[in-house]
Image (cartoon, rainbow, N blue to C red):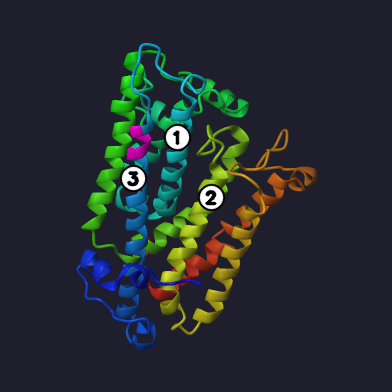
Amino acid sequence: MFIPARLRLGTAIAAAALSLPACGSDSDNDKLETDAEYEQNAIIDVKVFIQGNLDEFAAATAALQAAAPEPDEDGWSAATDKAAVDAMKAEWKKARQSYEHVEGAIAVIFPDLDHSTDNRYDAFIEIEADDNLFDDEVVTGVHAVERILWADEIPEPVLAFESALTNYAPAAFPASEAEAAAFKGELCARLAADAKKMQTDFEALALDAPSAYRGVIGSILEQVEKIGKAATGEEESRYAQYTLSDMRANVAAGEETYRAFQPWILTKAEGPEVDKEVLAGFSRLTSAYDAIEGDALPPVPDDWSDETPTAEQLATPFGELYTLVQRESDDATPGALAYEMTRSADLLGIAALP
């Protein structure tokens, strides 16, 4: 059962963060009369949800940095420092989950921090070569750290894609004291600092409905891109094979945000109909994701093409998931989750993002 965030964590705390008056008790939604009151309640809930995830993100990135081995003359690797690498990987996954819960809003609110924190390797080196994998320049963020932590496990399609890029440099563990020191004190420190800045800056931010709601719709639209890029080795969490987990977090956050706005939606004439469609869409995606074991997307069929997949390819676990995600991410098809989420935003008069 959904329990509003303002009730879980305290209306007074959330309202103070927003510089808005608190709305009251557990029966608030029965007493609301105006759109402004419903909107205020929803934003308070989403504000607290995002802040909680940013708190977790900052804690996990700091813990990842702390878990990095102290520099020594031969650096470190998954073989020589297994316990430390395992600990870093565990904190990386915690960081990844918390960030993917808020990615839709953060990309809108803090685009520069989203760039330094969440951009993929190819996006960075398209602009400039990275001569040092371990420092805090050029290639930074969660995927830069991921690329090093899983340097000995990178899938062949990813290697094939990246090795063909201009400015490509092979992933590697730190092989010297200087590289280990840079990884801990520069690359990981930069990620932790960026996470801390998001956490701190967001606390004083007055969130608005377009950032809170339309940003989530953007994350739903991106689901098809995330699965589509798996075929070419370009998927997001490509080194750890964690992209399905990313997508699960996006959808879970989308539903959490939707439910914050749900009482307001249900006051509209078409609200009950839209509500039913939106919840059904979330259910379809969640059920499909949960039916797959592990954190990775299903294997991509040989010779897969997004433009001309064969019936045989579409009948595979990857093909079936791709078909579903493609449909639910289509904001032009009635009944699709993206369409119905956009419809709900329009119903509330929530402006589109610029």
Up-down relation of residue 156 to residue 324 (above or below):
above
Judged from the image, the secondary structure of the residue bearing numbered disc 1 is helix
Q: In this view of the protein, can residue 253 be seen by the observer? A: yes
Res 87 label = 1
Magenta stretch in the rendered image = 62-66
Looking at numbered disc 3 in the image, what kind of residue is underneath it?
A: Ala
Up-down relation of residue 337 to residue 188 (above or below):
below
The residue where tag 2 is placed is: 247
The structure residue drawn at horizontal position 21% and vertical position 58%, both measured from the top left corner, is 204
- Residue farthest toward the front in the current orientation of the protein: 83
Up-down relation of residue 254 to residue 21 (above or below):
above
- Between discs 2 and 3, the one toward the N terminus: 3
Judged from the image, the secondary structure of the residue bearing numbered disc 3 is helix
Alpha carbon distance from label 2 to label 1: 23 Å
Q: How many marks?
A: 3
Res 59 label = 3
- Between discs 3 and 1, the one toward the N terminus: 3
Looking at numbered disc 2 in the image, what kind of residue is underneath it?
A: Met
Q: Position of residue 14 (x, y in %)?
A: 27, 67
The quadrant of the rendering that contains the C terminus is bottom left
Nearer the observer, 139 or 9:
9
